[in-house]
Amino acid sequence: MEKILQVKDLELSFNTFGGEVKAIRGVNFDLYKGETLAIVGESGSGKSVTTKSIMRLLPEESAEFKNGEILFGGRDLTKLSDREMQKIRGKDISMIFQDPMTSLNPTMPIGRQITEPILKHQKISKDEAKKLAVDLLRLVGMPKPELRMKQYPHQFSGGQRQRIVIAIALACNPQVLIADEPTTALDVTIQAQILELMKDLQKKIDTSIIFITHDLGVVANVADRVAVMYGGKIVEIGTVDEIFYNPQHPYTWGLLSSMPSMDAEDAKLYAIPGTPPDLLDPPKGDAFALRSEYAMKIDMEQPPPFFKVSDTHMAATWLLHPEAPTVEPPEMVIERMKKFPGSRYYEGSAN
Amino acid sequence: MARYIGKRLIYMFITLALIATFTFFLMKILPGSPIASADKLSPEQRAVVEARYGLDQPLPVQYFDYMFGLLQGDLGISINQFKGADVTDVILSRMGPSAQIGFQGMLLGTVLGILFGMVAALRQNTWMDYGSTIVAIIGISIPSFVFASMLQYWLGLKLDLFPVALWKDGFMSSVLPSIALAMFPLATAARFIRTEMIEVLGSDYITLAKAKGASGSEIAFKHAFRNALIPLITVLGPMAVSILTGSLVVEQIFAIPGIGEQFVKSIMVSDFSIIMGTTIFFSVFLIVIILVVDILYGVIDPRIRLSGGKS
Amino acid sequence: MTQNYDKLPQDAFTRIPRDTQEAEKISKPSVSFWQDAWRSLKKNKGAILSLILFGLIVLMSFLGPVISPYEPNDQTITHANLPPKIPVIENLGIMDGVGTLGGRQVDLYEMKNVEQNYWFGTDGLGRDMFSRVWKGTQVSLFIAFVAAAIDMLIGVIYGGISGYFGGRVDDVMQRIVEILTGIPNLVVVILFILIMDPGILAIIIALTITGWTGMSRVVRGQVLKYKSQEFVLAARTLGASDSRIIWKHLMPNVLGVIIINTMFTIPGAIFFEAFLSFIGLGLQAPDASLGTLINDGYKLIQYQPHILLFPAVVLSLIMIAFNLIGDGLRDALDPKMKD
């Protein structure tokens, strides 16, 4: 498959009054054409920062690339000038934000907000751009699009606004669409509609999507592959089945255990103890070790390398080292692993 | 919106009626007769004069006459300074210079203030930002009469660039007073626009505009400026108040034949009918300005404009 | 992955039992709201300098009249209109007692045979400007502080009651405030000054008669905001009394805005006092405030600019200092501005 975007050894820090916050500490992943890659993790894990750094939307005064590259179309995005970056934003890579209530300009009619990137990146007349905008609104499922072009954001509901934001993002048929928690701020029913819309649109226009979320339910619904981030690093990456049914990293175990499930016998929800690491002074070894009940001595001293589980599945945990003791994952995870061919708890087809 | 305006109009009338009533009774309890040389008149002469000014009527009648006159724009009669002239005429005859320096000051201050605020926000933490912040702090802190005296001393007296005082050289006479009045609006607008711009520039829709590929200047002018500018309307009211307050002293300092100068003169010679008339005139002016500003805000900001409809 | 992990120590893979205490440890020391506010205020150089400057001005307003050998209201007609003269600084060519007389620069002290030095010069009646300026500062500050304190007291009580009890009480109280705030401040102040005997008391009453409405609005808004929040509901559920909720739960949260608002009321009051004095509605001679001194000085601006200069500078410094302190406090206390 064709790699459309490659992030290599990316390291990024924020220079704050308190010191250097190492928000991304060596992130590697590839994005393939037409796929949806979900990045999951709790607040502060670096998932949003990673995608904002791809778009170069972080404040230039404080955010600083320390190492690594972001390859897109043969060019390293970390090295482009602002002007070159402006040509890529909204055209080749576009973005959908978390809160549709605040991401539209309140004093500009939505028609102009949709035509803005079209006029910016394509050499077409205003009238053509307007027609295109109406088509886009229809595409995202907005009824009576012609009438709504002149309306202001406050005249739309949250779900409708997110549809408009999606229309803006898709205006120039981008190769990469970054969706930063696009459904978090919406009602559950609206969430489902927006997710359906995005899946639907992806089939139509064949774009690659990076989908950021902390909601594993959403991940299961939309993603082809999943990257789990913790403490500014990816700790596990694999196909959606591999992450859900054969997880290897204790943090992924924790995430999966804390996910409410319909068929779990006891209704008690699991919570990962402790708080995320302080990235002003990140831990030396495995960032999760302090919160993990599977921690080993080496976890405190050396950061774990990636161990290959399968061709598509890798996890950064010392537990996969041949010399490491075998540990029992939480029960809920074992239940899942029983359904996955190739896992050590596989019991044959669950169906 | 119509309901809101209606409600505001009712409040406006209650407020004005209160001020007028208060003013009327104040005139009645102030020591001394409103007739200047009352002591020298014989009782008969006195009765004649009192009848002429309606002072022989019972108090409630006088009150309703006065209130009814107000509705028709009659602010009463100046008794000791202008010998029977209509207060309304006195005020109107002095409106020109006050309106001119007030308007010029407001315009100059607001335009420069917006400029300073924009530059400060777009070039945050540079010398331009610090410079405009210092100007803003000074403009807010230094009272207009101190500033006006300084202008008069340096630009008028020492450098002789502009007339020191009086209203004889047309526009040139209005320059220094206008600058003195402009300081507060300038400082207020600069601070306000800076804060608003910084807030707007940090908002999600600006990030989205960036994500669309908009350039720095497009973001500043197409997206941020309008959103930062609209709320400025809310401080136009306080600015108008400052211009009016300032005009009292600035006109005094530059000896400009405006309403403010007349007002201060009337205080010195205790011409109560002029003081009261001007007070009511000021009240109407300020209350109407604030009402207009509030309605204007509703008209210009689309979020408020259509808030009666769908949300 | 290129690293060689063969040389890992023997016991590298021993499990360590999870220390739950360690996991729940909060990595940053906890700081109280006030400590945090003080810290961010300390970083604000403008505010700290202003605080020091203001402290010095207050100190001088009490010490000034004492250390000056002259009483503020003592007139020495033979010493009238002397420019400032300060012993050491005079060698720099400024404040050396030289003034203009008939178009020529002369040392007026020598000419008039004055042995003493007047640091800020004298006014038209031969009164010592140094002690007058500081005495005037004292009076101006006194008026401003008392007015601000009264505004605060009435505003907090009125706004607090209105916000806390809500409903019909709030409705009625707010209608009254709406009408009062509709009346322009300038108009109220002038009307009240006219019916009262001029003096410090008249000015304070005029300033506070509607001045408190601003504070009451802010306090009401804050009380309304906090009283429906979960922590107050929780306290109520646990049976806390009204007074306990007000003092223990609401007050600490509202205190910030009260302080900020007061910090902006004080320069407003100083300005209004000076303004009234300037248009002739303020203190009557021989009492002096910064406003009356500026008014006196302004009349002689052409010939004796020093009489205007000193009170104007002190007044401006107080105003600047207060605005900067107010700004600093707002940034430090307003959690909205914090990330």
Image (cartoon, coloured by chain):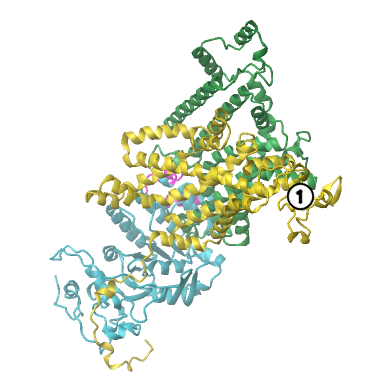
Chain colours: A cyan, B green, C yellow
Residue occupying image coordinates x 68% and y 21%:
B81
**Amino acid on which disc 1 is placed:** Pro
Q: Is residue C60 left or right of residue A342?
A: right
Residue A119 point in image, percent of width and height? 53, 55
**Image spot of residue B275 (x, y percent):** 61, 26
Q: Magenta stretch: residue C240 in it?
A: no
- Left or right: residue A226 versus residue A65 is left
Residue A69 place in picture, x, y as percent: 47, 76
Characterize the magenta stretch by its predominant secondary structure: helix
Query: Which residue is tagged 1?
Result: C83
The magenta span reads A129-152
Mark 1 secondary-structure assignment: loop
Q: Nearer the viewer, residue C294 or A88?
A: C294
Q: Residue A137 magenta-drawn?
A: yes
In the rendered image of this protein, does residue C201 appear above or below residue A293? above
Q: Quadrant of the C terminus of chain A?
A: bottom left
Q: Is residue A114 visible?
A: yes
Q: Nearer the viewer, residue C31 or C61?
A: C61
